Amino acid sequence: MPDTVALIVAAGRGERAPGAIPKQYRTLAGKPVLRWPIEAFLSHPKVDAVQAVIHRDDRDLYQAATAGLVLNAPVLGGTTRAESVRRGLEALDGSPPRHVLIHDGARPLVSARLIDRVAGALDHADAAAPMVPVTDTLRRRTETGYEIVPRDDLLRAQTPQGFRYEKIADAHRRFVGQPATDDIALAERANLTIAAVAGEETNIKLTTADDFIAAEKLALSSLLDVRTGTGFDAHRFGPGDHVWLCGVKVPHGSALVGHSDADVGLHALTDAILGALGAADIGAHFPPSDERWRGAPSHLFLDHAAQLVRKQGGLISHVDVTLICERPKVAPHREAMRARIADILQINADRVSVKATTSDGLGFTGRSEGIAAQAVATIRLPA
Ligand code: MG
């Protein structure tokens, strides 16, 4: 039986422009918003499992946002927040935890210390919530103007809100269908003992465009160790009718010869990322002597390097690939290559550059004996 489970509620639609992706899945400092709190809880020593509640239309977005993480299967939420939480709690019923920490998926920057405080307060209370004082002057609009509202006893409630599981599950069953802005409101209705712990101003709930800007700055401020790596690769031409370049199949009068698909662009880029990590080279991770990699698509290699960065809590800030060849022409495929690399690295395409040059007829590329590529990768790691 798990001791503490984090229940992350991300089923809301919010208000947004048609076609825009929900805010939980937008990118914040290189990764989806929802991935931030999920990783924070997964890596916390007091948390045994993470259960997300998502919207039924977001299943693909959720799978992409949580790739590589070990999580309970997501639960589909309801039409209200309370209903979504109740469904999440019910999903835990088969193996009920002692404590549950209920968190808004739109609060990406929850800290380990805050999780500690909330979880710790459950030793002496049924429920616990982080609170922050109101520091701005509050005013209420009236018919004649704006009157000051005394703020001395006002607090803003944040999440995670922690509970003894059986008690909050029971409250959700008893008050089903009744409106509640958060789970502490239900705990109050059920006469549970509630402890307040200090919240954090950095525990922003993403609502406005300004919130995203502030959160992006805060998120990047934890990634101060900036590193650069370079990579180089070359493959010779042989018989064939296409080449793989930067993950894109390009028709050509010959193919590139290699143990894998001989994608020089992705090989150089993989080495650049490994270089930035100080993690040896592509040959060390994927030995040519290993039959598993015969004919392998090179996106596997690049994905591996990107995963190593993510495992360290890092961010791929920018990559720049230069392809060196007389033929084929790269320009018609450039945008497809950028998009493909961005897709493999799980970063935005504006962080990816693909360039091409000839060697002015000089050397092996000039004689069209093969294609060379060089790459630079810039990554940011937690300081
Ligand atoms: Mg190679």
Image (spheres, rainbow, N blue to C red):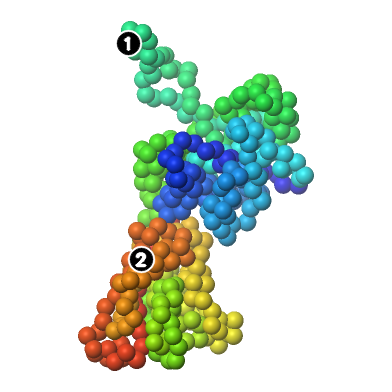
Q: Eyeballing the image, is 223 above or below 325? A: above
Of mark 1 and mark 2, the one earlier in the sequence is: 1
Q: In the figure, 369 relative to 205: above or below?
A: below
- Image vertical order of residue 60 relative to residue 10, above or below: below
User: What kind of residue is marked 2?
Assistant: Glu
Q: Position of residue 158 (x, y in %)?
A: 52, 32
State the count of labels.
2
Crowd class of label 1 (few under 14; some 14 to 19; many from 20; radius 10 Å): few
Residue matched to label 2: 335
The residue mark sitting in front, 1 or 2, is 2
Percent across and percent down for residue 13 are 52, 38
Residue drawn at x 36%, y 43% as measured from the top left: 213
Secondary-structure class at tag 1? loop
Image quadrant assignment for residue 20: top left
Q: Residue at x 47, y 20 (%)?
A: 154
Rounded to the nearest angstrom, the CA distance separating label 1 from label 2 is: 55 Å
Residue at mark 1: C-beta within 8 A of ligand 1: no
- Nearer to me, 375 or 218: 375
* Residue 278 percent location from the top left of the image: 43, 71
Residue 348: which quarter of the image?
A: bottom left
Q: Which residue is mark 1?
A: 145
Q: In the rendered structure, which amino acid carries the disc numbered 1?
A: Gly
In this picture, residue 121 sits left or right of residue 217: right
Q: Specify the farthest residue to the top.
A: 144
Most foreground residue, 171 or 250: 250
Name the side, left or right, on which 78 lies relative to 170: left
The residue depicted at 40 percent of the width and 54 percent of the height is 223
**Outermost residue to the left:** 360
Query: Which of the 4 quarters of the picture holds residue 326?
Result: bottom left
Q: Residue at x 43, y 82 (%)?
A: 242
